[in-house]
Amino acid sequence: MSVQVAVNGYGTIGKRVADAVTLQPDMELLGVAKTSPNHEADLAVENGYPLYAAVEERVELFDEAGIELAGEVEELVAAADVVVDACPSGIGAENRSLYEAHDTPAIYQGGEDADIVDVSFVARANYGAATGADHVRVVSCNTTGLSRLLAPLEEAYGVEKARVTLVRRGGDPAQTGRGPINDILPNPVSLPSHHGPDVNTIFPDLDIDTLGLKVPATLMHTHSVNVTLEASPDAADVVNLLDEGDRTFLIPPEHGIDGAGALKEYAMDRGRPRADIWENCIWGESITVEDDDLYLFQAVHQESDVVPENIDAIRAVTGTADAAESVARTNETLGVGF
Ligand code: NAD
């Protein structure tokens, strides 16, 4: 019997997770809940996704827009085996009591505080910790990207200290409210940025300092990474190690991909839905080891790297597959791994 999945909050992350759920042989998308009758709501109905009103007072807005509703969010949550909450930051915490009232396990996103959940989640690092949990948080795009990188490094060499400068996109392509912009902001101006402590929700003992900058770009985040290892591997060994993972993509030098714009073009050429890039994109030529210090650049696509993680979190929470099975199934159905 398929796991019945509800998606509450149908925006940038929610619509991607909903589409990904429909590709899983062991899951069924029971419905999606939304607050506004915009073009995404229109498409959800066109796709055959039962659409529920997330806020009772807004039902009439859907009626006025001629968009057919299947009901209200409470019915959806009550009927689901698990709900993925992809509401704006902070709303997930407000929704928690709704999920508890119906005894429906919930998966939240990285904009929520870690202390509202039992477990923060990255499949590569701590899948098992979410098994059977009622409240799980798929960490942010940046924390997901850093954790996927640090997990194999920690296992293979041991990490003494990680130092990361995150060059962050100013907004997502459709976030017009964040622009027009032309600036470069230390963000936050004081150290650390929230990303290091967030990585510590996945690796509690890891020594990591992070700094953040925001730039006027919408395509991807870029990380400048320095990891002091407990061993001194050859750069070629690190390349091989990171090349082995399906969710770490070593950009082949001969592809001539020199930035986030070229990466997005690559994703479009490869027919990726919404030009999504689920993998960490690591420039192989940047991988340098000086004594025990590793340096590299990677880019992460903020709108999509957490999507496979949400699918794995659904299986972890419902106990329907172990880590290896789930990750393999998610990768295969989505087409993760260039
Ligand atoms: P978004 O604004 O694109 O989408 C959120 C959706 O939720 C919107 O459609 C909004 O109308 C709807 N909504 C608002 N209030 C609601 C309510 N009470 N009930 C149901 N739906 C409601 O936001 P997003 O970018 O998809 O972010 C969602 C979460 O994912 C946040 O926690 C965010 O931090 C996290 N996240 C975002 C990104 C990213 O780059 N966009 C990356 C990783 C994680």
Image (spheres, rainbow, N blue to C red):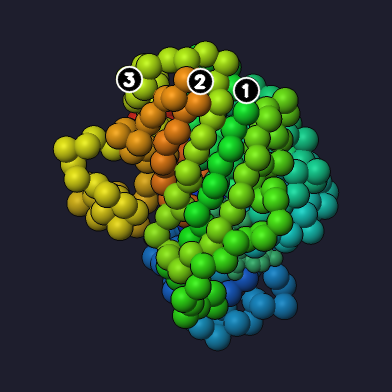
Tag 3 or tag 1, which sits nearer the N-term? 1
SS class, disc 1: strand
Q: Is residue 165 visible?
A: yes
Kindly check if marks 1 and 3 are in contact, taking CB atoms under 8 A apart as contact.
no
What amino acid type should be assigned to the residue bearing mark 3? Ala
Disc number at residue 292?
A: 2
Instruction: Verify CB contact (< 8 Å) between mark 1 and mark 2.
Output: yes
Query: Which marked residue is nearer to the observer: mark 2 or mark 3?
Result: 2
Residue 203 lies in what quarter of the image? top right
Residue 171, horizontal then vertical, whole percent: 51, 66
Residue 170 visible? The answer is no
Q: Amino acid at mark 2?
A: Asp
Dividing the image into 4 quarters, which one contains the C terminus?
top left
| Mark 2 vs 3: CB contact within 8 A | no
Instruction: Name the residue tied to disc 3.
Output: 236
Q: Position of residue 164 (x, y in %)?
A: 56, 41
Name the residue: 54% across, 74% down: 178
Indicate left or right for 194 with 313 as reference. Answer: right
Residue type at mark 1 is Glu
User: In terms of depth relative to the viewer, which is nearer, 72 or 273?
Assistant: 273
Characterize the local packing of mark 2: few (<14), some (14-19) or many (20 or more) Cα atoms within 10 angstroms. some
Q: Residue furthest bottom?
A: 64
Image region (quadrant) for ligand 1: bottom right
- Figure check: 7 above or below 124: below
Which residue shows up at 60% across the image and 82% down it? 61
Towards the viewer: 307 or 55: 307
CA gap between label 1 and label 3 equals: 20 Å
How far across and down, in percent of the image, does residue 91 sit?
Answer: 72, 61
Residue 167 drawn at (x, y percent): 50, 54
Residue ID for mark 1: 160
For discs 1 and 2, the disc positioned in front in the rendered view: 2
